Amino acid sequence: MKYVDEFRRQDLARKLSADIKREADPERQYNLMEFCGGHTHAIFRYGVQNLMPPNVRFVHGPGCPVCVLPIGRIDNAIQMVQQHDVILCSYGDMLRVPASDRKSLLKVSAEGGDVRMVYSTQDALKIARDNPERQVVFFAIGFETTTPPSAVAIKQAQAEGLKNFSVFCNHVLTPAAITNILESPEVREVGSVRIDGFFGPSHVSSIIGSQPYEFFAEEFQRPVVIAGFEPLDVMQSTLMLIRQLNEGRYEVENEYMRVVSREGNLKAKGLVAEVMELRRSFEWRGLGLVPYSALKIKKEFAEFDAEKHFELPAIQVNDIKGCECPSILRGVKRPTDCKLFGTVCTTENPMGSCMVSSEGACAAYWSYGRFTQTNSEQESVA
Amino acid sequence: MCHAIPAQVVAIDEASDMATVSLDGVKKDISLALVQDVQVGDYLLVHVGYALSKVSPEEAERTLELFAEMAQLDGVQP
């Protein structure tokens, strides 16, 4: 596949690996957080960690929308199906996530609830058109990449005069979450969690551009390199971060020039701004309440807002006992530090959200990394 | 969740603002609501049924050249 295969070449990976080993200063530790679950997945799938010297370590961040959505929001979705008899349209990733009382959307569907997996918001609109007598709700989750398609669907529903379509909006924002991690006590207090630099997300940045990262590169004095999702992209970006750290720089650099510009996708950003606005705060699994970290639907579009339409209550649910997802999402613990990992919690039977989504750190460890304890892991554990 | 895939445009339907893209031969109809100035032959980053942005062939080439250059400097054949 063009623009994919070229960025997975083994010979160049070996070369980049040698460059990184040569340029990484053996006297220092490089803890680099990949915010995005897509990078976590790439790092494990292609064994990128094993191509790094022991002092270069990837810290997995919270950039997996399925993983950070609090259980209460899934309970809300289930409520709409069971109490309001809606057709709930959801991306496939959400269906198996455990909710309260050992429920999940998949189980609700097995019990007769009308839950439909859709690939696109366009499919959800079609279901609404085909079922005018039923209320159809789109369970909108995701970062800035999936937000514009939700905005388009709302605009389209308005233009078509669809009266039975609404969106349950759970869209969250990347820069707010990164700022939250950098301000957390674990990162601020010396000797706890150290994060020396960040990989900026690939496709989130195609929408928001590289500009939003400039604030915290400057404010927190950490370098950011926006990286593509292929293994060579991740390796090249690692080299760029190492160079910045060696030279004492903290700038926003862009390795993923073929897609990401400084200003991002203006058309998509404009559509989102027209339909949605900031929430004062939003709960994230692992991070707690994060100010201005999510979007809600504007008043002008209230008739398409499922939260208003069904008057959904805020539900507080504790995480599953023993599950370390919250610490794993902050980069404080590793999947292997969790007692449930690989014992009662596996990809076949996930207990925590980090195991459900293929982009979750636990799923990546379980699927690709469980047999290869890397040098750098042993090193940093020791 | 945020992993889009590059696919080539094979046809455009301006009336519906949709395009047909080819993903290694597999055809799919996607929305062009989020992008501008798309031509047949362009590569688009496709995600959840929408094109998120165009892939720049020049920039892709430049990134690949960067890898290759470094390889040549060290006498490794790309």
Image (spheres, rainbow, N blue to C red):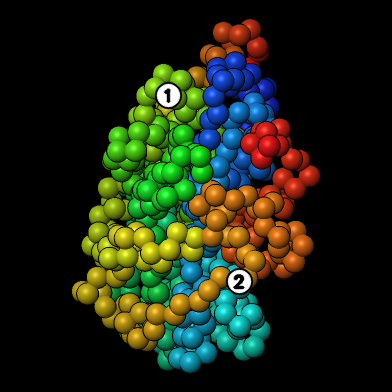
Q: Residue at x 65, y 12 (%)?
A: B76
Q: Could you say where residue B22 lies in the image, as x and y percent from the top left? A: 55, 48
User: Distance of mark 1 from mark 2, alpha carbons?
Assistant: 40 Å
Residue A49 visible in the picture: yes
**Residue in the image at 41% along x and 51% along y:** A184
Looking at the picture, which amino acid does disc 1 mark?
Gln
The answer to whether marks 1 and 2 sit on the same chain is yes
The answer to whether the residues at label 1 and label 2 have Cβ atoms under 8 Å apart is: no
Q: Is residue A80 above or below residue A275?
A: below
Image height of A151 relative to A165, above or below: above
Chain for numbered disc 1: A
Q: Earlier in the sequence, mark 1 or mark 2?
A: 1
Kind of residue sitting beneath label 2: Ile
Residue on which disc 2 sits:
A320
Q: Check the residue under mark 2 and report the chain it is in.
A: A
Q: Residue at x 42, y 91 (%)?
A: A133
> What label does residue A350 carry, if any?
none
Viewer-nearest residue: A135 or A362: A362
Residue A330, position as x, y percentages in the image: 50, 52
Q: Is residue A285 above or below residue A266?
A: below
To which quarter of the image does residue A353 belong? bottom right
Eye-nearest disc, 1 or 2: 2
Using the image, tell me which numbered label, if any, was put on residue A244.
1
Can you give x and y, in whole percent of width and height, for residue A266 in the image? 27, 47
Q: Secondary structure at mark 1?
A: helix
Image quarter of the C terminus of chain A: top right
Asked which secondary structure carries label 2, the reply is: loop
Q: Residues within 10 Å of mark 1 (few under 14, many from 20)?
A: many
